[in-house]
Amino acid sequence: MTSRRLPWAAPANALSRAREGRRYVDLTESNPTRVGLRYDEAAILAALSSPALLAYDPHPLGLRAAREAVAAYYAAKGAAVDPERIVLTASTSEAYSFVFKLLCDAGDQVLVPEPSYPLFGWLTSLECVEAVPYETRFDGEWHVAGLPAAPRARAVLAVSPGNPTGAFLKRDELEAMRACGLPLIVDEVFADFPAGADVRRVETVAGREDCFALSGLSKVCGLPQVKLGWMVAPERFVPKLEMIADAYLSVSAPAQHGAAALLAARHGFQRQLAARIAANRAALVRARSASAPWDVLPSEGGWSAVLSVPRGRGEEEWALALLDAGVLVHPGYFFDFPSAGFLVVSLILPEAPFEAAASALAAVLNA
């Protein structure tokens, strides 16, 4: 017997089955280490080879020097963050699990955005917590449409910018969420990749007394394999988070000792990837003719593009037709869009194969 936390026997969908054994340009790729980006290999290896890691000196919140490096990262954004409010984790996913353990009992609820990355359903289920969706709507840009009544809600989760919508949290949305009186958990992993400036935008919630700010090296430095995430927590919750973290002590010594050097070197990676994202979005827009029955929705940031497509075919039908043309995309239902007619593509592939894939994509959607 196993628990009922997850649908252990969930079958593969038609798209997953159809892709087996086929060659295609993968426009679902989200792993920055697999898309030909240049890394300063010598600097990374040096950062992860400190002699200090030979000694085991655990701290539940993480080594002070690593937390100070994260605080310096926020200082560069204009946010003053006390290192004593930073909790290091092995990933952002683990940071979520810590916050859910902190705030929720079994059967409690967390409000989560829709559309958004499907991981939240799994993470909440693993903690025996119910994810209650709240809608974001598109009217030229994405907006939070309001929060539902949820009597057992213990927190509100937001993603800024959204994955895959690219919508940053706006100041008025933040205030509306704070007015509900629940702690706010904000995933800011893509926040260093804006498409432009916007005075309405919340740059970070780090340091606010009713907010948890989550991020990590996976997106900030393009180093998911290093396994270092963090949260900036309200001061009153830090002692209890320290108890949770002390039960796991999951962050590796190399990641902690290398944090300062890895974060200091993030700018080269970010400039390189930001230029690629901009070039690929432009290629996608160029591939669409003025009379095309599909469109590229505006985005404020992040690594993805959302396409609106004709509803004469279902999203999975479109994805299968594109796979026949040698292009793999995500159907919108993967991200729980509130209605049909969306596809999602990653913008981080090298420009040449992406442009070729965009042309093939346009030919299929135009037909």
Image (spheres, grey):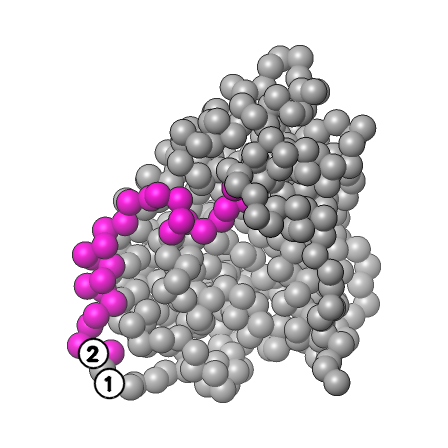
Q: Is residue 186 left or right of residue 44?
A: right
Q: Is residue 201 left or right of residue 79?
A: right
Q: Residue 52: horizontal and vertical position, in percent?
A: 20, 78
Q: CB under 8 Å between callouts 1 and 2?
A: yes
Residue sitting nearer the eye, 2 or 303: 2
Label 1 belongs to which residue? 55
Quadrant of the snapshot with the N terminus? bottom right
- Inspect the image, locate mark 1, and give the three-letter code of the amino acid beneath it: Ala
Looking at the image, residue 45 lies above or below residue 173: below
Graded by Cα atoms within 10 Å as few (under 14), some (14 to 19) or many (20 or more), the crowding at tag 2 reads: few
Q: Residue 14: horizontal and vertical position, in percent?
A: 72, 48
Q: Residue 254: horizontal and vertical position, in percent?
A: 29, 72
Q: Which secondary structure, mark 2? A: helix
Q: Which secondary structure, mark 1? A: loop
Residue 263: image tag: none
The residue depicted at 50 percent of the width and 61 percent of the height is: 213
Where are the magenta residues, as a range?
26-53
Residue 98 visible (yes or no): yes
As measured in the structure, the alpha-carbon distance from the residue carrying label 1 to the one carrying label 2 is: 6 Å
The residue depicted at 25 percent of the width and 67 percent of the height is: 48
The residue depicted at 19 percent of the width and 63 percent of the height is: 46
Residue sitting nearer the eye, 165 or 181: 165
Q: Residue 41: horizontal and vertical position, in percent?
A: 23, 54
Label 2 belongs to which residue? 52
- Location of residue 310 by image quarter: top right
Q: Is residue 287 left or right of residue 50?
A: right
As drawn, the residue found furthest toward the front would be 21
The residue depicted at 48 percent of the width and 83 percent of the height is: 248
